[in-house]
Amino acid sequence: DGGITQSPKYLFRKEGQNVTLSCEQNLNHDAMYWYRQDPGQGLRLIYYSQIVNDFQKGDIAEGYSVSREKKESFPLTVTSAQKNPTAFYLCASSMLPTGQGSYGYTFGSGTRLTVV
Amino acid sequence: QQPVQSPQAVILREGEDAVINCSSSKALYSVHWYRQKHGEAPVFLMILLKGGEQKGHEKISASFNEKKQQSSLYLTASQLSYSGTYFCGTPWNTGNQFYFGTGTSLTVIP
């Protein structure tokens, strides 16, 4: 079955460490996205990518970095510059850039990151 | 920039109806609706592409009023499985920045 796989499901980070969250999709979707969700809050856009080797910052990109070397993969690195990284991270993909087609987002199951 | 949803939270008994509203300060080109169960990823419900469009999904339907820059989600004869947080979402302009609404927590009790 096609879908998005995020790993790990739970991740613990020590102060000053960089950690990388994996996101892989086999839906042949062009666009991929990273969102952050804090408890009881909505989803905030970190980065998005429409094409390989190209990506754009969202509203809260500071302290995060991404790469899109393959269409299927869009890993997110949470750097030590991100001072409050504890949150639920969601990766999503869509067939077309949203707003131009009849396709919604497909989300991965998420990674819960905690600073220890 | 984030669409505002109302109400923030609602509690229903099984079989009751609910309406969730999504309002934007900017023009809406399309509206998505998602439902998120606690601790899980959001699940796509439907998309409305044209002003005035209405869609249905089981007993859940939605309308899109382009002129008023708002959309409403209608849940009729609610079931326990409808519990969760509902988000609307919309792109700004025709670009690819996509914003989710503030969310509405819906709890259905027996």
Image: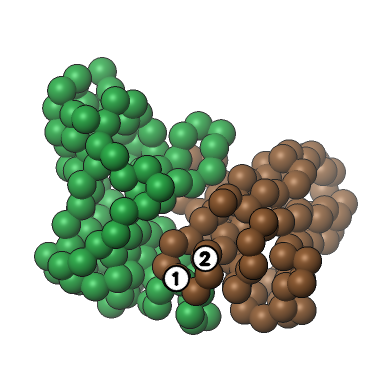
Please, is residue B82 above or below residue B58 in the view?
above
Tell me if mark 2 has few (under 14), some (14-19) or many (20+) residues whose alpha carbon lies within 10 angstroms of its own. Answer: many
Chain for numbered disc 2: B
Q: Residues within 10 Å of mark 1 (few under 14, many from 20)?
A: few
Identified by mark 1, the residue type is Gly
Residue position for label 2 = B91
Residue at the disc numbered 1: B95
Q: Is residue A59 above or below residue B29?
A: above
Residue B81 visible, this orientation: no
Chain seen in brown: B
- Amino acid at the residue labelled 2: Pro
Residue drawn at x 22%, y 59% as measured from the top left = A74
Determine the chain carrying the residue at label 1. B
Disc 2 versus disc 1: distance between alpha carbons? 7 Å
Residue under the image location 37 percent in, 43 percent down? A60
Q: Are marks 2 and 1 on the same chain?
A: yes
- Mark 2–mark 1 contact, CB under 8 Å? yes
In x, y percent, where is residue B103?
Answer: 63, 46
- Chain A rendered in what hue? green
Query: Residue drawn at (40%, 47%), measured in percent from left and top?
Result: A59
Residue A106's x, y, as percent? Answer: 42, 64
Where residue A50 sits: x, y (%)?
30, 71
* Residue B66: % across, % down: 72, 73
